Amino acid sequence: MIDLADRNKKNRGLEVVIKFKNQDFGKLRAHLLADSSREYYACLLGKRNVVDNLCVITVADIYFADAEYYRNQSVAALRVSGEFLRERLLELDRRIDIDTMIDVHTHPFSQSNVWFSGTDDRDEINFVQYLHDEGAENFQASTVAVSSFR
């Protein structure tokens, strides 16, 4: 079992900045928050550069899960198929210009408070454990988007 507490200590104090190309952030925000009746998911692939306590992730590509990739989707829950995630992981492994995957999902039931639910926390622990077990050496992060997402 991977020691997530140890991993968190290593990243503690690290300021993370996510940079987008041109209008990509606006497109991400508009697409994810267009429908507040259910949660939506996107996967960002990018390149990470760390200098001292600053980590800058430059997003290269944004992938939105199409309807067929949702196993469960409601106003308060979301489950994306393993196939969608596997395709992103294979691309991450195949390309040399990216080394980071960022999961983004919405909480349409919240207008301004951003937090990870207990389900989010469990899913992230399981996903990080899966990546570790598979020998993945890429960086993975998650974030939640609400209507005040800027």
Image (tube, rainbow, N blue to C red):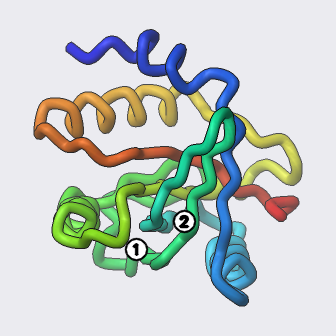
Q: Residue placed at 69% from the left, 24% from the top?
A: 13
Name which of mark 2 and mark 1 comes first in the sequence.
Answer: 2
Q: Total number of numbered labels?
A: 2
- Residue 35 visible (yes or no): no
Percent across and percent down for residue 40 are 54, 65
Dot 2 corresponds to which residue? 40
Q: Tag on residue 65?
A: 1
Percent across and percent down for residue 53 are 67, 33
**Left or right, residue 120 beside residue 1:** right
Q: Amino acid at mark 1?
A: Ala
Q: Residue placed at 55% from the left, 57% from the top?
A: 104
**Left or right, residue 114 beside residue 106:** right
Vertical order, 79 against 8 (above or below)? below
Q: Residue placed at 31% from the left, 47% from the top?
A: 138
- Marks 2 and 1 in Cβ contact (< 8 Å): yes
Give me the C-alpha separation between circle 2 and circle 1: 8 Å
Quadrant where the N terminus sits is: top left
User: For this rendering, which residue is in front, 26 or 17?
Assistant: 17
Q: Quadrant of residue 88?
A: bottom left
